[in-house]
Image (cartoon, rainbow, N blue to C red):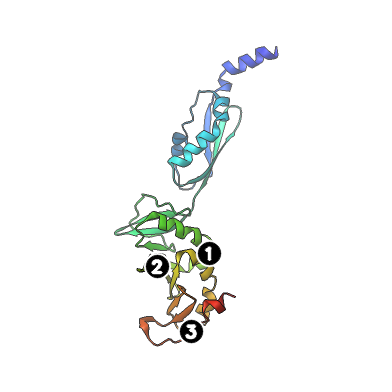
């Protein structure tokens, strides 16, 4: 009897995938998720469930915004695809348009005519690998500090290919190395609070501040050998 029931189950519609639902999406279209998964309705439920990692990987490969895809059973013969998306954390400026930059450093081909309010703008980045290196440090910054950044410009010199200039919303400008961004910016608030008016905070070698337009240094802060103790 058990054997007969098993055989009847596997030849019945209940053993075939009947429905696919998607949850967790914000900016990605649910139907695109289903299409890119290559899951097939009316085909073996258990065979596809056993290969679910393959289908999950297909979704992530084909849709850059997807950080994680998890396929689980939902009901008798249904799947649910739970999606976790990468956040858009910045915008790349390529005149006259803007391209979203994900938290993993991936630049999306989508074109925007106007920037998103409050989101930092990245300029002069010719190589996506540089943006990915930058994002490794940028993602470690406190949220309050990120909210104070309006623009990051890649500004390499002949001797230093890591330099970036950061325009802050409080009107200061920061010069810092990409690889030291999270380490050095931890001292930003302390340095900025000691400045009488907005100026440049140079973190390339040590940490010190000076007024704009190369005027006589108004206020100096301890060099890195002292500040970073």
Real-space Cα distance between discs 2 and 3?
A: 23 Å
Figure quadrant of residue 2: top right
Q: Please tell me which residue lies in front, 133 or 96.
A: 133
Q: Which residue is mark 2?
A: 160
User: Residue at (44%, 36%) from the top-left corner?
Assistant: 36
Where residue 12 sits: x, y (%)?
A: 57, 17
Real-space Cα distance between discs 1 and 2?
A: 22 Å
**Element assignment for label 3:** loop
Residue 141 is labelled as: 1
Residue 129 is labelled as: none
Q: Nearer the viewer, mark 1 or mark 3?
A: 3
Left/right of residue 87 with respect to residue 93 in the rendered view: right
Where residue 223 sits: x, y (%)?
A: 51, 79
Q: Residues within 10 Å of mark 1 (few under 14, many from 20)?
A: some
The answer to the question of whether label 2 and label 3 lie on touching residues, with beta carbons closer than 8 A, is: no
Where residue 144 sits: x, y (%)?
A: 53, 67
**Element assignment for label 2:** loop
**Element assignment for label 1:** loop
Real-space Cα distance between discs 1 and 3?
A: 24 Å
The answer to the question of whether label 1 and label 2 lie on touching residues, with beta carbons closer than 8 A, is: no
Instruction: Specify which label sits upstream in the sequence, 2 or 3.
Output: 2
User: Residue at (70%, 11%) from the top-left corner?
Assistant: 1
Instruction: Specify which label sits upstream in the sequence, 1 or 2.
Output: 1
Instruction: Check the image and name the residue furthest to the front.
Output: 159
**Depicted 144 relative to depicted 202: above or below:** above
**Depicted 103 relative to depicted 178: above or below:** above
Q: Nearer the viewer, mark 1 or mark 2?
A: 2
Q: Which residue is mark 3?
A: 220
**Depicted 53 relative to depicted 227: above or below:** above
The answer to the question of whether label 1 and label 3 lie on touching residues, with beta carbons closer than 8 A, is: no
Q: Please tell me which residue lies in front, 65 or 185.
A: 185
């Amino acid at each position: 009897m058990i054997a007969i029931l098993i055989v009847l189950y596997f030849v019945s519609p209940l053993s075939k995938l009947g429905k696919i639902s998607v949850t967790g999406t914000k900016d990605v279209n649910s139907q695109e998720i289903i299409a890119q998964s290559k899951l097939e309705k009316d085909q073996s439920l258990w065979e596809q469930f056993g290969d679910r990692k393959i289908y999950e990987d297909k979704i992530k490969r084909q849709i850059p915004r997807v950080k994680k895809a998890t396929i689980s059973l939902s009901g008798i013969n249904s799947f649910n695809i739970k999606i976790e998306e990468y956040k858009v954390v910045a915008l790349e400026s390529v005149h006259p348009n803007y391209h979203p930059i994900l938290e993993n450093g991936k630049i999306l081909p989508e074109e925007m005519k106007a920037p998103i309010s409050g989101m930092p703008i990245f300029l002069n980045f010719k190589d996506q690998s540089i943006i990915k290196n930058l994002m490794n440090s940028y993602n470690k910054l406190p949220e309050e500090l990120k909210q104070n950044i309006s623009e990051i410009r890649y500004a390499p010199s002949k001797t230093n290919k890591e330099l970036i200039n950061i325009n802050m919303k409080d009107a200061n400008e920061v010069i810092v190395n990409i690889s030291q961004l999270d380490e050095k910016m931890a001292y930003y608030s302390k340095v900025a609070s000691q400045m009488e008016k907005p100026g440049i905070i140079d973190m390339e070698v040590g940490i010190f501040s000076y007024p704009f337009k190369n005027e006589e240094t108004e206020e100096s802060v301890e060099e890195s050998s002292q500040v970073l103790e």
